[in-house]
Every structure is written in C-alpha cells, then in structure tokens.
C-alpha cells in the first residue's frame, strides 16, 4: 500500500512539477536524470514517479524495482565516470518526494572527504572537471542502453 502526501502538496513538489534534471530514462514508475552540477559531472538521480515520501511507502515489488534501478545506475556511473567512490543518498528533507542521489566522488573534488552538501574543502581543478565532463556523452549512452529494458 502506498502512502501519498496530501494532494495539494504534489502541486508544490518540484519533483512532481519538473523533471529534476536532464531525463536519461523515463519508465512508468521512475525516471533517471542527470543533475546539472558544474562541480559534480555524472551526478544522477533516480526519482520515483508517484508522490510518496519513503521507500517503505512502496509495495515490496516496487521497492525491489527501485533498488534494482539504483544499483544499475550506480554501476553505469562507476564504469563511465571512474570515481574513487560513489555516494548514495536519499534524504528528502527539503523535497519530501522519494528520490536517490548517485554522486561520483574524487579525492580532488570540491568537498572530499565531506559530503557534497558540506563545506567545500578546495576549489576543483579545471583540468580534472574537464576530463569528467568529457565522459558525460558516454554516460548518457550507456545509461540509456543499460535501462532500456525498464518500460
């Protein structure tokens, strides 16, 4: 059984009223988007289509689908972006709509080892960012290929 927010809150939810990034794959129950973050090329989100707040609001099969997609997206980001680490996060404190962040992390990124929402530790190097940005077309292509079986 799915517990939805009151109907009027979906009208104000940014993930209900906008894509939340460049849509890489749209399925019936979710979408995968590329986040426009200049410091974190390859930052993706998996966004559940229905306006629910927690993973446990979903029926078991939907939870399994969501987690499977999350792992698929993580694998593509790892393969293409070649990060030192992947950060996975599902907060929803600011936007209480079920979504996951998949963030490639590097020891020379602006916040490492802190979370990307923490205090910056350094200015990112332009050359490193450029290398990562050059991988984005490959990320788009591989993500679309990997997720093609999810209608």
Image (tube, helix red, strand yellow):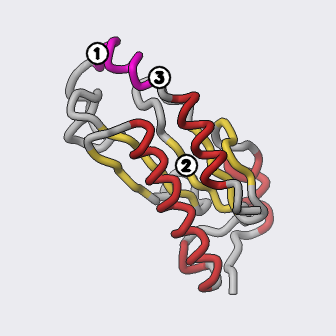
Identify the mark nearer the N-term, 1 or 2. 2
Query: 69 above or below 34?
Result: below
Kindly indicate the quadrant of the structure image that contains residue 29. bottom right
Mark 3 — residue? 133
Which of 121/126 is in front?
126
Residue 130 magenta-highlighted:
yes
Which of 45/140 is in front?
140
Which percent across, then down, holds residue 141? 62, 37
| CA neighbours of label 1 inside 10 A, class few (<14), some (14 to 19), many (20+) | few
Residue 27 magenta-highlighted:
no
The boundaries of the magenta stretch are 124-132
Query: 67 above or below 45?
Result: below
Who's the residue at 64% across and 48% down the image?
145
Which of 14/69 is in front?
69
Which percent across, then down, holds residue 142? 58, 42
Task: Report the side of 51 relative to 36 (left or right).
Answer: right
Is residue 55 in view from this perspective? yes
Labels 3 and 1 touching (C-beta < 8 A): no
Mark 2 — residue? 45
| CA neighbours of label 2 inside 10 A, class few (<14), some (14 to 19), many (20+) | many
Who's the residue at 47% across and 23% down the image?
133
Q: Main secondary structure of the magenta part?
A: helix
Identify the mark nearer the N-term, 2 or 3. 2
Task: Report the side of 29 relative to 134 (left or right).
Answer: right
Mark 1 — residue? 125
């Amino acid at each position: 059984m799915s517990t939805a927010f009151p109907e009027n809150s979906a009208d104000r939810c940014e993930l209900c009223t906008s894509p939340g990034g460049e849509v890489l794959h749209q399925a019936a129950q979710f979408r995968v988007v590329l986040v426009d973050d200049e410091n974190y090329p390859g930052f993706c989100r998996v966004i559940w289509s229905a306006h629910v707040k927690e993973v446990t609001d979903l029926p078991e099969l939907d939870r399994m689908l969501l987690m499977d997609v999350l792992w698929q997206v993580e694998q593509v980001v790892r393969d293409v972006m070649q990060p030192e680490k992947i950060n996975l996060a599902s907060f929803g404190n600011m936007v209480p709509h079920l979504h996951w962040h998949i963030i490639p992390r590097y020891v020379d990124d602006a916040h490492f080892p802190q979370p990307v929402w923490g205090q910056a530790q350094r200015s990112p190097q332009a050359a490193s960012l450029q290398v990562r940005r050059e991988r984005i077309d490959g990320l788009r292509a591989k993500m679309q290929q990997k997720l093609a079986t999810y209608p």
